[in-house]
């Protein structure tokens, strides 16, 4: 079964575009060559110092193998980790998830995106109406301890994709979900999810 990471990084003030440029230029293809699928990477529109991204793996064993290949054995991370880490204050806000409705395959393009993404994170009892994708906590132990994940939490995550900001805002006006975390996201230029 597919395993998905929802990664939220808190960055040093004013460093988000530096990380995005480095990530999009140097770190997408090497991760995918190692066995990760970089689903999408985003600017958080409510926090100028937050970078949010999703990546997925066929299963936990494949996750361990891919992360080992990229972080411990790969040249790209060895070459760029200092520059990437210099932009970050915290990279441990990570949810390990399994799909209820998985992301459909998306081609990576270089076109500018006007689309917007909404991610809702709520308790497991949360009901999401027609999400683009939805996930629940993967209860298995983190098999790659070098990268921490949030443990002891049980959540449901819904993801919606909109053609533009106005469409997302219209959808949000109809939401009556006060007890969920909202991530209002703008895709980077190389995000497959858009």
Image (spheres, grey):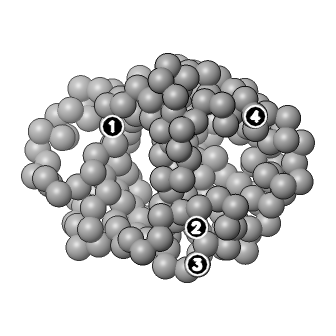
Q: What element carries label 1?
A: strand
Secondary structure category for the residue under label 3: loop
User: Answer yes or no: do the residues labelled 3 and 4 have beta carbons within 8 Å?
Assistant: no
- Image coords of residue 161 (percent x, y): 37, 41
Q: In this view, does 43 lie to the left or right of 21?
A: left
What is the distance, in whole Å, between disc 4 and disc 2 at their CAs?
Answer: 27 Å
Residue 41 lies, with reference to residue 160, above or below; the image says above
Q: Earlier in the sequence, mark 4 or mark 2?
A: 2
Q: Which residue is drawn at 23% across and 73% down?
A: 125
Q: Residue 51 vs residue 116: left or right?
A: right
| Residue 56 in sight here | yes
Residue closest to the eye, 54 or 174: 54
Residue 184 circle label: 1
| Residue 13 placement (x, y as % from top left) | 47, 24
Q: How crowded is mark 2: few (under 14 residues within 10 Å), some or many (20 or more)?
A: many
- Which residue is identified by label 4? 82
Question: Can you tell which mark lies on residue 141?
Answer: 3
- Which comes sooner in the sequence, label 1 or label 4? 4
Disc marking residue 3: 2
Q: Residues within 10 Å of mark 3 (few under 14, many from 20)?
A: few
């Amino acid at each position: 079964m597919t395993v998905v990471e929802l990664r939220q990084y808190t960055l040093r003030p004013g460093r988000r575009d530096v990380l995005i440029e480095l990530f999009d230029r140097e770190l997408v293809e090497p991760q995918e060559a190692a066995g990760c699928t970089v689903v999408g990477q985003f600017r958080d529109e409510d926090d100028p110092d937050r970078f949010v991204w999703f990546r997925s793996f066929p299963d936990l064993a494949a996750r361990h193998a891919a992360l080992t290949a990229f972080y411990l054995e790969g040249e790209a991370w060895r070459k760029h980790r200092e520059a990437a880490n210099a932009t970050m204050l915290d990279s441990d806000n990570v949810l390990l998830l399994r799909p209820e409705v998985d992301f459909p395959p998306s081609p990576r393009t270089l076109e500018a995106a006007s689309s917007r993404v909404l991610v809702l994170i709520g308790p497991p009892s949360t009901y999401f109406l027609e999400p683009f994708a939805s996930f629940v906590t993967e209860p298995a132990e983190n098999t790659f301890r070098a990268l921490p994940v949030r443990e002891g939490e049980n959540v449901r995550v819904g993801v919606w994709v909109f053609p533009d900001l106005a469409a997302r805002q219209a959808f949000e006006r109809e939401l009556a979900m006060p007890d969920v975390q909202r991530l209002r996201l703008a895709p980077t230029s190389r995000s497959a999810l858009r």
